[in-house]
Amino acid sequence: MLWEQAQKKLKENQPGVNGETGHLNEQLIKRTKLIHPLKGFVQCIEGFALTPTYTNKSCKRANGTKERLRYRYYVSQQAIRRGYEGLAIRTLNAELLEESVKQILVGGLPLLNRLVVEEQWSEDQVQARLKIGAESIGKVSSAHDLGRVTELLAPKVVVSKDSIQVHVFPEGLLRLLQSPLSGGGEVSTALTVEMAMRDGCAILSSKVSLERSRGHTRIFDGETGEVVSVARTEPKASLIQALAQGEFWRMKLMENPDAGLTEVVKPYGLKPEYVRRLLNFAYLAPGIKRAIMQGEQPTMMRLQDVLEMREMAWEKQREILGFERFDRDAVA
């Protein structure tokens, strides 16, 4: 009976069944669970907490089907209570804010030797440990891993329209330095970091500029004007698929130089208008194609951005798609 099948399914999904510690789809839940590493640690300059939230948006794949993508944000509690009008800080893209905090910690951690009180460590050992800590944080590539850092460090992050401050306390810094760390490799940041001491607390700060662009807030270094961006750690399937299809249609047109696009796509039952947009991928700068294949495209870059683009100049493509920090020789 259908009722019995439903009851069996419900029972199977209860924690503890068959020795499971959670639901049978526990791994799926873990993979899709939203992690907000700054939750409880971040606030605006007025003292209002920035609360994590998210939106789901529909995005068309290269094959014409749709998928739901989830975007994380931090929103001001003041905005939730009173509305957005007149507020300097409304919503901030979570990945960009977290990347900014990460870069401030990477740049500022080696400056915090005065904050470490550990009798068993010499001055040189403290400095070496701070350097390893900065290198370890520099290798963080996920919200989950950054969450482990913030849980140990327990900083206070204060965001205003022209600065981001990370308040580091002695107890949290010692917890972080005593935890297993894996240094090595060069670390670089887009943000210029300054350090000040106040009431036994170290304040790491960076001047920033928050600018709205294409409906999103972007973060710039207030000193250099360099944009803070986050590279994806994994290739994005929808972009790679669109890139492959764009190349496919470019080859088809080259094989039939005397035929128009309508004639070429007719045997495949596709609309010429959609294939014409896919061809944008075929004419992207080589460096942008390589970034897509390696999963190093800017976080804010969407499939729709390329489909709607009407720009052939490579430098302009980089500007439109947010590749300001892309390697110069990537488009050579």
Image (cartoon, grey):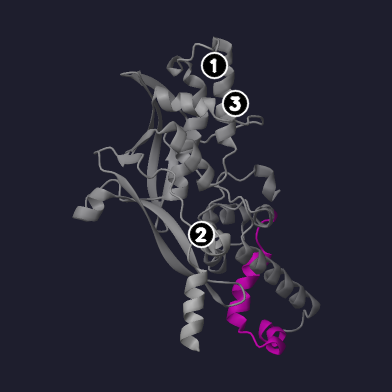
Magenta stretch encompasses residue 306: no
**Residue nearest the observer in this picture, 19 or 243:** 19
Q: Would residue 191 be visible to someone looking at this image?
A: no
Residue positioned most to the left: 82
> Is residue 131 left or right of 251 when viewed as pictured?
left
Residue corresponding to mark 3: 132
In primary-sequence order, the first of circles 3 and 2 is 2
Nearer to us of marks 2 and 1 is 2
Q: Residue at x 60, y 84 (%)?
A: 271
Residue type beneath disc 1: Val
Q: CA distance from mark 1 to mark 3?
A: 10 Å
Q: Residue at x 40, y 62 (%)?
A: 55
Q: x, y (%) of residue 265?
A: 69, 84
Q: Would residue 83 be visible to someone looking at this image?
A: yes
> Is residue 5 left or right of 294 when viewed as pictured?
left
Residue corresponding to mark 1: 126
Q: x, y (%) of residue 53?
A: 37, 55
Residue corresponding to mark 2: 22
Q: What stretch of residues is rendered in magenta?
A: 260-286
In primary-sequence order, the first of circles 1 and 3 is 1
Q: Residue at x 44, y 44 (%)?
A: 37
Dot 3 alpha-carbon crowd within 10 angstroms: few under 14, some 14 to 19, many 20 or more: many
Mark 2 lies on a secondary structure that is loop
Magenta stretch encompasses residue 275: yes
Dot 1 alpha-carbon crowd within 10 angstroms: few under 14, some 14 to 19, many 20 or more: many
Mark 1 lies on a secondary structure that is helix
**Residue nearest the observer in this picture, 182 or 195:** 182
Q: Residue at x 61, y 66 (%)?
A: 238
**Residue nearest the observer in this picture, 174 or 59:** 174
